[in-house]
Image: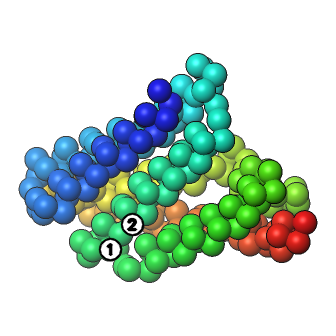
Amino acid sequence: MANFISIFRIFIMFAAVYLIYAMEGNAQAYFWALILTILAFSLDGVDGWVARKFNEVSKFGALLDIMGDRIVENTYWVLFAVMGWLNILFPLIALTRGFVTDTIRSAAMEKGLTPFGMQRNPVCKWITGSKFMRISYAVAKVLAFILIIAAKIPSVPNQELIWNIGYWAAVFAIVFCVVRGLPVVIEAKRVIEE
């Protein structure tokens, strides 16, 4: 069930992206895209809860969760750049960071380490794996994506304010993305040599 939820949220995100891209400027389509986006991100927490509650925790499930996170996150960054809502640097930074860290983490997994378990340095471990940092990064992304979509719905009150908050949340999320990726790169040599 947890794996189904992980995959299902990707399809929900694709429906939201379709509504934004194919029906540009349509208030009703953007409203439903906003609802679907909120649902897609809400399900990210639900899949982990279901896995723990029903004892479905597995390495495959963890990989599926990471894959789903990358697909959903990167699709929104790319969509916003394609729509001209954000600069192309946003998706380029997010994609590059994802490719680099996931490649290093794959090497670590071949050695039996988990994606967050490869970190040995306590500061690096806290930056990449602490609940506070993971939640803060997730909140920044979700806030950015939701507010950017909401700001583009025609006739929404306070559009400029919503846009500004969403934009700065996106900037913060991209900075967070890089900061959380650096410890993986810093400890990569040790993991590969071991």
Let me know if residue 135 appears in the view.
no
Q: Nearer the viewer, residue 3 or 40?
A: 3
Above or below, 170 against 150 in this view is below
Let me know if residue 173 appears in the view.
yes
| CA separation in Å, label 2 and label 1 | 6 Å
What residue is drawn where x is 30% and y is 66%?
79
Residue linked to disc 2 = 77
What residue is drawn where x is 37% and y is 79%?
87
Residue linked to disc 1 = 81
Describe residue 138's horizontal placement relative to residue 101 as left or right: left
Residue type, mark 2 in image: Trp
Q: Nearer the viewer, residue 51 or 90?
A: 51
User: Can you give x and y, in whole percent of width and height, for residue 60 in the image?
Assistant: 60, 42
Above or below, 186 against 23 in this view is below
Tell me, yes or no, whether the two marked residues, 2 and 1, touch with CB atoms within 8 Å: yes
Secondary structure at numbered mark 2: helix
Secondary structure at numbered mark 1: helix
- What quarter of the picture does the C terminus occupy? bottom right
Q: Based on the displayed image, in which of its 4 quarters is residue 179 positioned?
A: bottom right
Above or below, 94 against 115 in this view is below
| Label 1: how many Cα within 10 Å (few below 14, some 14–19, many 20+) | some
Residue type, mark 1 in image: Ala
Q: Based on the displayed image, in which of its 4 quarters is residue 65 positioned?
A: top right
